[in-house]
Amino acid sequence: PDVLGDYVHHVPLNDLEALELTMREHGHEIGAMLIEPILGNAGSITASVEYLKGARALCDEHRVVLIFDEVKTGFRVARGGVQELMGVEADLCTFAKAMGNGYPISAFAGREEIMRLIRPGGVAQGGTSAAHPVPLAAAEKTLEILDETDALERIADYGTRMQEGMAQILSRKGIDHVFTGHPSMGGLFFLDEVPTNYRDWADSDYTLYNELALELNDMGILCEPDSREPWFISAAHDESCMTETLEKFETALAIVLDRQATKA
């Protein structure tokens, strides 16, 4: 409903000055600040460490609860998620996705004084499938593997090397490009500068990306056919996957560029 807009203040990502102004004018009536530090539905555009530290300080100053959406970054970009990666702790945070390795599960966590408010006679919490034993068992084993193996280091390394290979292909064609986010869930933009907020995505050549992604899908490379979705890497990806991905990336790019040239 439109009325909900009266209860929300929108601030552009990485604009600390705008956030400070909003807090100064409305901090006394703001209950919480919700942020997704790496935008999982905007090509992994990332909040800077400086912005997150500034947000943390402003929330402390104005007694505002800081909430991190780590549904996609949690247990992926680091064992401790974005909070470990960037050294900034939230008051509350949400998790899902990687923690169950495909099984349907989500969780939220936070500072003890906040979490202890969830109790009989206090804040209610429940769900139809809450604490279902199957996804809990999956999550327990997944988190054990992530804790005791180098799975996260391997997917980060794979993502880095994949981006390096893509960059070489794009550079040979003279196409401006940048990668965003963490290599385990990186975004690809056809820009000459790294985007810093969602508005930058709107100014990028996402039509080229979308055409390229559809060609890749037809070839069996299952990237999301929407430039707002990152390239998610799995520990199951091996060197044969890398070779196939880069070969087909180059082929698909050539097909799209030829088609665009014909239309022109």
Image (cartoon, rainbow, N blue to C red):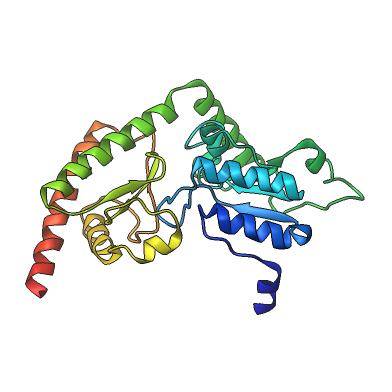
Residue 46 location (% of width, % of height): 46, 48
Residue at left offset 56%, top offset 30%: 143
Residue at left offset 38%, top offset 33%: 156
Q: Is residue 181 left or right of residue 171?
A: right
Identify which residue, 84 or 258, lies in the foreground. Answer: 84
Residue 48 location (% of width, % of height): 49, 44
Whether residue 163 is visible, yes or no, is yes
Count of numbered circles in the view: 0
238 relative to 90, above or below: above
Residue 80 location (% of width, % of height): 57, 32
Q: Is residue 200 left or right of residue 100?
A: left
Residue at left offset 50%, top offset 26%: 145
Q: Residue furthest bottom?
A: 2
Residue at left offset 32%, top offset 46%: 179
Q: Is residue 189 left or right of residue 26?
A: left
Q: Is residue 23 left or right of residue 50?
A: right
Whether residue 130 is visible, yes or no, is no
Q: Residue furthest right?
A: 121
Identify which residue, 263 or 201, lies in the foreground. Answer: 201
Q: Residue furthest top?
A: 148
160 relative to 21, above or below: above
Quarter of the figure with the N terminus: bottom right
Quarter of the figure with the C terminus: bottom left
Q: Within the image, what quadrant is residue 185 found in?
A: top left
Residue 7 location (% of width, % of height): 71, 68
